[in-house]
Image (tube, helix red, strand yellow):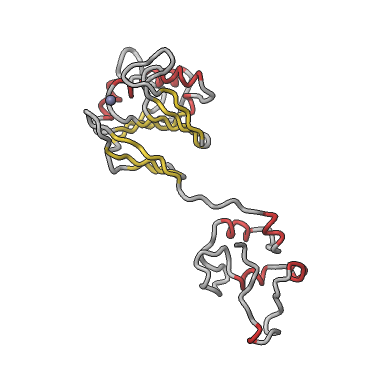
Amino acid sequence: MQIVFLGTSGSWPTPRRNVSAVAVKRGPEVLLFDCGEGTQRQFMLSKLSFMQVSRVFVSHFHGDHFLGLPGMVQSMSMNGREAPLDVYGPRGIERLVGELLALGYFTPGFAVRAKELPPGGEIDGGEYVVRAFEAVHTVPCVSFVLEEKTRPGRFSVDRAEALGVPSGPLYSRLQAAATRCPMRRCSRWPAMRTCSSTMRRQMRPSRRRRIGTGIRPRGRRPNSQRRPGSASLS
Ligand SMILES: [Zn+2]
């Protein structure tokens, strides 16, 4: 994730700072928080492109936070954009966007979908969520929180191979931290990648000896010597 401050000035720009806009690049898309006048040019001065913007979040309707929107939409259209653009903001955003896009002789060549995002609302972006909270200002205003959803941890192939885990579907189960044993034999590892009995069954005999898990064929070890399997990926 990359955060680029395209504008940090308030009310009007200064020779060195533009008005409000913050771009968050996340994967192939860019989320834009506020779009003050001249934001498209600020994009040109950065390593990001305004053509990557998929969603715009407008905090409130003071001009230094949204007047860059019609110009940026026109440039997107002239650059051949076809993908829809979603614009979120406080109550009245649909009317505001409609009026901005009706200025002059211009009709965007793609869909600009304005949607109200009041305090308490949220947008589900798949792998992330943007939540809106009420902000203190002289006009209705929201602040936004970008929250990433829980992702699987990094899977160590070397570690798995060292433990004798056979490559294949079990790798993805381990990475996803499966909560239920695929063999349905064991329920004592609520958040474990797989249970020891499954691991034993799927490990190759040669690996069993090499990594010294103490695994023996079923029934050979007396009950008194049995111990929990040690082949977990902890
Ligand atoms: Zn303001």
In screen coordinates, is 44 left or right of 170? left
Quarter of the render that holds ligand 1: top left
In screen coordinates, is 37 left or right of 213? left
Furthest residue in direction left, as rendered: 138
- In which image quadrant can residue 57 be found? top left
- Locate the C terminus and report the quarter of the image it occupies: bottom right
Task: Give the image location of residue 6, x and y in percent.
Answer: 44, 24
In screen coordinates, is 69 left or right of 159? left
Q: Is residue 157 above or below residue 31?
A: below
Q: Is residue 117 above or below residue 217?
A: above
Q: Residue at x 37, y 18 (%)?
A: 37
- How many marks the image carries: the answer is 0
Task: Give the image location of residue 29, x and y in percent.
Answer: 49, 33
Task: Give the image location of residue 122, x and y in percent.
Answer: 34, 42
Most foreground residue, 86 or 58: 58
Q: Residue at x 45, y 26 (%)?
A: 5
- In which image quadrant can residue 39 be found? top left
Most foreground residue, 179 or 10: 10
Q: Residue at x 37, y 16 (%)?
A: 13
